Image (cartoon, grey):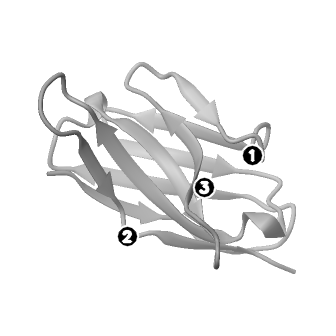
Amino acid sequence: QVQLVESGGGLVQPGGSLRLSCAASGSIFSRYYMGWYRQAPGKQRELVAGINWGGGINYDDSVKGRFTISRDNAKNTVYLQMNSLKPEDTAVYYCNAYWAPSKGLPDNYWGQGTQVTVSS
């Protein structure tokens, strides 16, 4: 079992910055692929950024150059630094932990979500 707790959301003006954190507990954090997803009202949940155990990173095109994902395996925490925020970034942001063992079902865990609102 993995428990994920997000923090750092809030209200910010366009062009502003926020840093989201996701603290994990309960299993071997370093082996998980960690992702930040977001879901806006009336839209499907989408992957914003992900980072694997070795530090390999991928971003959605809409956030490249503005968002930075990082992880600290010693602290069991993954971060999402969001700069140059736009109103279209408004959504609930979710942390996800995923690990697919060689045998058996994959582990897939979600945090409770944190609201990010970009508005003047």
Q: Earlier in the sequence, mark 3 or mark 1?
A: 3
> Which residue is drawn at the image coordinates 79% and 59% (left, top)?
85
Q: Position of residue 32 (x, y in %)?
A: 31, 34
Q: Position of residue 81 (x, y in %)?
A: 63, 48
Quarter in which the C terminus is drawn = bottom right
From the viewer's perspective, is residue 12 above or below residue 5?
A: below
Mark 3 to mark 1 CA distance (whole Å): 14 Å
> Which residue is drawn at the image coordinates 83% and 54% (left, top)?
84
Dot 3 surroundings within 10 Å: few (below 14), some, or many (20 or more)?
some
Q: Is residue 11 left or right of residue 21?
A: right
Q: Is residue 86 visible?
A: yes
Mark 1 vs 2: CB contact within 8 A:
no
The residue sitting at the top extreme is 54
Dot 1 surroundings within 10 Å: few (below 14), some, or many (20 or more)?
some
Which residue lies under the disc numbered 1? 63
Label 3 sits on a secondary structure element that is: strand
Residue depth check, mark 3 versus mark 2: number of the one nearer the observer: 2
Mark 3 vs 1: CB contact within 8 A:
no
Dot 2 surroundings within 10 Å: few (below 14), some, or many (20 or more)?
some
Which residue lies under the disc numbered 3? 19
